[in-house]
Amino acid sequence: MLKKFASVAGAMALTTALVTPAMAELSGTLRIMSDMSNPAPRAIMEGLAADFDAMHPNLTVEVEIVDREAWKSQIRNALTADAPDVINWYAANRMGPYVKAGLFEDISDMYANGDLPGLDSVKGAMTMDGKQWGVPYTYYQWGIYYREDIFKDLGLSEPTTFDEEIANCQKIVDSGRKCYTIGSKFLWTAGGWFDYMNMRTNGFDFHMQLATGQASWTSDEVKATFANWRKLIDMGAFIDDHQTYSWQEALPPFVNGEATAYLMGNFVVPHLREAGLTDEQIDFYQFPKIADVPMGEDAPTDTFHIASGAKNKEAARAFLQYVTSADVQTKINAGSGLGQLPVNANSSVDDDEFLNQGFDMLSNNATGGIAQFFDRDFPAEMASVGMEGLQEFMVFPDNLDDILNRLEAARTRIYK
Amino acid sequence: MSAATQSWANRNRMTLTPLLFLAPGMLFFAVYVIIPIFQSFNISLYEWDGLGEATFVGARNYQELVTDRAFEISLWNNVKWLLLYLLAIPAGLFIALFLNQTVFGIRLYKSLFFFPFVISQVVVGLVFSWFYLPNVGLFDIVMGWFGVDIRGGVLGNPNTATYGIIAAGIWPQTAYCMILYLTGLNAVDPEQVEAGRLDGAKGWRMLWHVILPQLRPATFIAFVVTIIGALRSFDLISIMTNGGPFGSTRVLSFYMFEKALSEYGFRMGYGSAIAVVLFFIMLFFIAYFLWSMYRDEKEARR
């Protein structure tokens, strides 16, 4: 899978050198190891490498693309033995093990001296122990994707409060449909529901306290979250037998109109369009308000980091700067590329119904704060025990006390 | 001087030659099996994420195992697997007895019965998960005729999921036992069967007193491969339920993988502690197998 991009002809190199004199001195080899293995991201990554290679005549850019799922465990080997210069990973707590083991390069100085203009709003997700450890390159919103046509038939409108949500749902259930599809076989989808129920019931700050181990799983706040969630479960809002489906296997009920909404990340949209739903049939709304707290949102961010064992750190820093620059961000996150949101405030969002709504929501109506996602905000072990408990709750809500005691025991053991 | 060395090598060549031939095998066995076993023992005494510094915690990982409910469930599931998997042996025997006749096209029937063992475990797992699908799966439809409704489908219900996977595992395992018994039946002495028949034995008595004793080697091998198959039941679980719903179908090998090597794992010490427990369970069976093989060889030599 190793791809080499040969340097380009002299004339071209000369012009690029003139345009960017500061970067032209880069030389040697830049090794990038990427997890962007799906077709569209792969094309983007290879394009980025080729362009960066062309900009720097004396620099050779090598890209190795690893399967996205496999990378989640391979990164450990990659960083410890013969580390590449630049690698892909995820923001927030997911960086923890590598930051603590000293395997990521501290790039706080780049943020401090203005090398990364337009990234101020996303800086928080890259911060750990008061320092910054990488740059984001894309992110996407979560929220409720729903069947606009069925809502119209039933005379429903987008709810903004939980009471409206429940009233809508009752009408949907009465019409013989389910309100939400979900496939919880691989657990994380239940994590998304908990994120929203908890952020709406107790606010973003409490959610983060829970994630960092400062709040208790047996507290009244958490119990209130589950009580709200249970209202939906008890009224039969979720499709049956969801514990046997993956998130893709949960798509058909939505496409067939047996379930009217799906709490998901924006990556669900291409799947819905491929399944034959038009943009008139699907729409998006922000998860409605429950308690009177500022709204927090899930917006998982994918990132680039420099390995602390990198051999060509100068080129690696230049690459990070290049990837996050406003123009490149606009280009790679467009609908023809990743189809997600650019991280640079000076970039423009592609003209897409869902990207525009998501961008507007995250910029104007996420005053509580932006979370990464259950399995990225909570430490890995807490996330795995937690999501298992959440799935059990969705199937057997009566087991709640037992589940919460188990999670609380895990909390006291995991956070030291 | 050199004559003395030569004569020493010469004198001991009956001992040296086998040792030299064994050396590469022993070296690899030590490097890839023996030493890692002791390394696992060692790591199980540490708290280590595989990246940073390992801290010595003594027996704390084992103390945690005792109170860990997920471990307890995995252990019980291992017991269920071991016991229920043994059903493959009698099932294989009866299919073999049934197929051990000479009629037209018997070879085709034999290969059809052997087919599930040839296909990959992944395929077996997928086929059975579709078979078990709630509402649309064949199993659910058939159970519906009898008015039985398993909530969440076989694999979605924590009370039935493990049995569902074991049933899927028994299917290819039965085929394996069947082939072992078919070859065993070829070696059954017709004269003894004839003698038994003259003495008036037939049906079950014939099977129990005449046929089965002659099938003992086949039974032993079937027992060994079935026990080993039950203990390495990793792939079916991973394909069919991924350990769920809420961890009710994990077995020790799967739990070890989850704790040490999966996306949310990397507790090397804890994973090693689970591996050590699994090792001792296996050691119990391995010791029994070795002992009975040793005993048979001694008898044969006499």
Image (cartoon, rainbow, N blue to C red):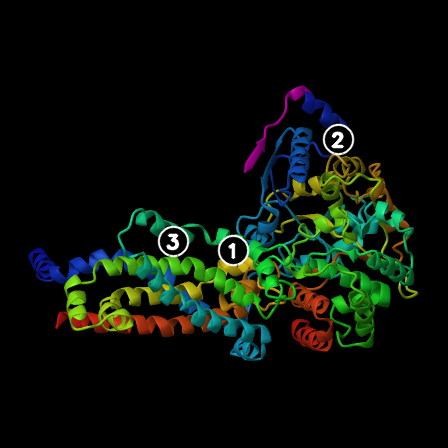
Q: In this picture, which residue range is highlighted in magenta?
A: A1-11
Q: Amino acid at mark 1?
A: Gly
The numbered dot on residue A20 is: 2
Residue A399 position by quadrant: bottom right
- Tell me the number on the disc at residue B97: none
Cβ–Cβ under 8 Å for marks 2 and 1 = no
Q: Name the foreground residue: B287 vs B107.
A: B107
Mark 2 secondary-structure assignment: loop
Q: Which residue is mark 1?
A: B125
Compared to residue A315, the image places residue A387 above or below, namely: below
Are the residues tagged 2 and 3 within 8 Å (C-beta)?
A: no
- Is A62 within the magenta? no
Q: In the rendered image, is residue B45 in sight?
A: no
Of circles 2 and 1, which is in front?
Answer: 1
Q: Disc 1 sits on a residue from what chain?
A: B
Please give the name of the residue rendered at 54% of the width and 67% of the height, measured from the top-left corner.
Answer: B162
State the SS at label 1. helix
Q: Distance of mark 2 from mark 3, alpha carbons?
A: 71 Å
- The residue type indicated by label 2 comes to Thr
In the picture, measured across the screen, residue A322 lies left or right of residue B180, that is: right
Q: What residue is shown with label 3?
A: B113
Looking at the image, which residue is at 89% across and 51% down?
A: A154
Residue A10 is situated, as x and y percent measured from the top left of the image, at: 65, 21
Vertical order, A347 against A237 (above or below): above
